[in-house]
Image (tube, grey):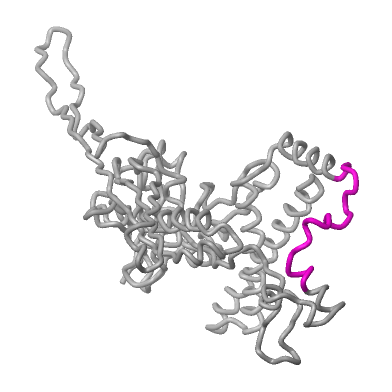
Amino acid sequence: MDNQEVKSAIESLGKTFEAFKETNDKRLKEVEKKGTADPVTEDKLSKIEKDLDKLEDVNQAVTKAKLSQDAVAEKMAKIETIISRPNFGAGLPEKEVSYQKKVFDKWLRHGKDSLGPDEVKVLTASNDNTAGYLAPPEYVRELIKGIIEMSPIRSISRVRSTTHRSVQIPKRTSTFSAQWVAESGTRSETTGYQVGLEEIPAHELYALVDISEQELEDSVFNLEAEMNSEFIEQFAKAEGNAFVSGNSVGKPEGIVTNSDIAVTTSTTTSATFVANDLITVYHAVKPDYARNGTWVFNRTTLAAIRKLQDTAGNYVFQAGFSLQVGVPNTILGSPYVEATDVADIGSSTKPVYFGDFRRGYLVVDRTSLSIMRDPFTQATSGNVRYIARRRVGGQVILPEALHILQCKA
C-alpha cells in the first residue's frame, strides 16, 4: 500500500465516520421528536455502518500485518528476476503439458479408435457414446473454507512457556500500612504483609481425525498440510473460547467466570448500556491499568458503541489513523479488540471488558502443537488416523487490573 493509497484510506475513514455521526444525530433527533426514527434515516445509517465495517477491517488488517519496506523491496526484486528470465510468459514446455490434455488432443485429432484403455478411462465422463468424452476439467488447488472466528485474548495477555505441568506465581495477598511516629515514640511491627501462590495448570486439548488412504493418495492439494492448518485453527478457536468463559474444570479459567473481577451494572432500565456506563468502567480501574487498558467486546456490541454519545454530545468511538501513523481506532481513548466469544448485549449479560490484560491474565503454553500420524490403528478400514494435542493454561492473576460491564436485567 503506497502513500497515496494510505492517504485515500484515511480520508475515506474520516469522511465515512463524519457521515455516520451526522446521520446518527439526525436519527436521535427523530426518535426524540416522534418516538421513532424515519426508515430512510435508519437505512442510510445501516449502509454507512457497513462501509465503516469494511474500513475497520482494512484498518486492523494493516495494523496487524505490515510488510516492512525491505520486505517489499525484496519481493519486488524476486518478481523482477522472474520477469527478466528468458522465455518469461511463453507457454509451458511440452513435457509439462498435462497428460489429460494430450489425450484430449489425440482424441480430437484421431477419434476414439486411436486411444488406449488407460487413455479412454482418462476422458470418460459417462457411458453415453455420443457425449461421453469431455474436455478435462480445471481443478483449483485450494480448499473452500469458511472464516474461523476466534477470540484474540492471547494477543493482549501475557504469555509464557513452561516445561512443567503447571506454573506457580508468588502473589501478594495483603500488605502492611506505614505508621507515623514521634521522635522518641515506640515503634512496633507493621504486620499484614502476606504472600501466596497462584498455580496455573496446563490443560489438554485434543482432536482425532480419520482420513482415508485413497483421499491422501488422490488429493491434488497437500491434505496432510491442510489438516495441520485445520488443527491449529480449531485449537485456537477452542482456547479463545476458554479464555473468555472457561470454568477451570479441565480447561482454562475464563475472564467472565472469575468472581474476583469487579463488575459495574449499567444504569439503564433495559438490557443495554449508555456512554456514561463505559466512562464509569474506564475510571473504575486504577490509572496505571487504564493507561495500558484495552476494551474487549464482540462485533455486534461494537456497532452499538459507535452510536453512543456522552452528555456533551461527543462520540465515545473515535476513528484512528493506524494505516499511516499506527494510531488505532479507540473507545474513550483506549484501543479495543473484537472477541467473538464475548456475550451480546442483553438482559444480565456481560458484553464489555476493560483493563490491562497483560497484567491481569496469564496464558501458559506447555505443548504448543503435537500431531501424531497413525497408519496402523485404522489400517483395516483403509484410514490413516491423525491425533493432535495441545496443552495450554490460562487464568486471571490480577483481578484488580480488569473490570466488566454487565447489562441490567
Inspect the magenta stretch and tell me whether residue 31 lies in it.
Answer: no
Question: Closest to the observer: 41 or 201?
Answer: 201
Q: Quadrant of residue 340?
A: bottom left
Determine the residue positioned at 37% across, 74% down.
270
Q: Is residue 409 left or right of residue 25?
A: left
Question: Does the magenta run of residues contain 93?
Answer: yes
Left or right, 240 with respect to 3, comes to left
Name which quarter of the figure residue 200 lies in. Answer: top left
Residue 171 screen position, x and y as percent:
23, 33
The correct choice, above or below, for 48 with respect to 353 in the image is below
- Residue 269 appears at what percent x and percent y? 36, 72
Residue 305 on image: x %, y %:
51, 62
Q: Residue at x 23, y 34 (%)?
A: 168
Tell me residue 268's x, y (percent). 38, 68
Closer to the camera, 197 or 265? 197
Asked if residue 364 shows in the view, the reply is no
Q: Classify residue 409 by image quadrant.
A: bottom left
Residue 395 can be seen in this image: yes
Identify the residue at horizontal 35%, vertical 41% (top origin). Answer: 365
Magenta region, residue range: 83-103
Residue placed most toward the observer, 396 or 133: 133
- Number of labelled discs? 0
Residue shown at the point (89%, 42%) measured from the top left = 84
Relative placement, left or right, of 155 versus 42 is: left
Residue lying at the far top of the rendered structure: 184
Residue 41 sits above or below residue 147 on the image: below
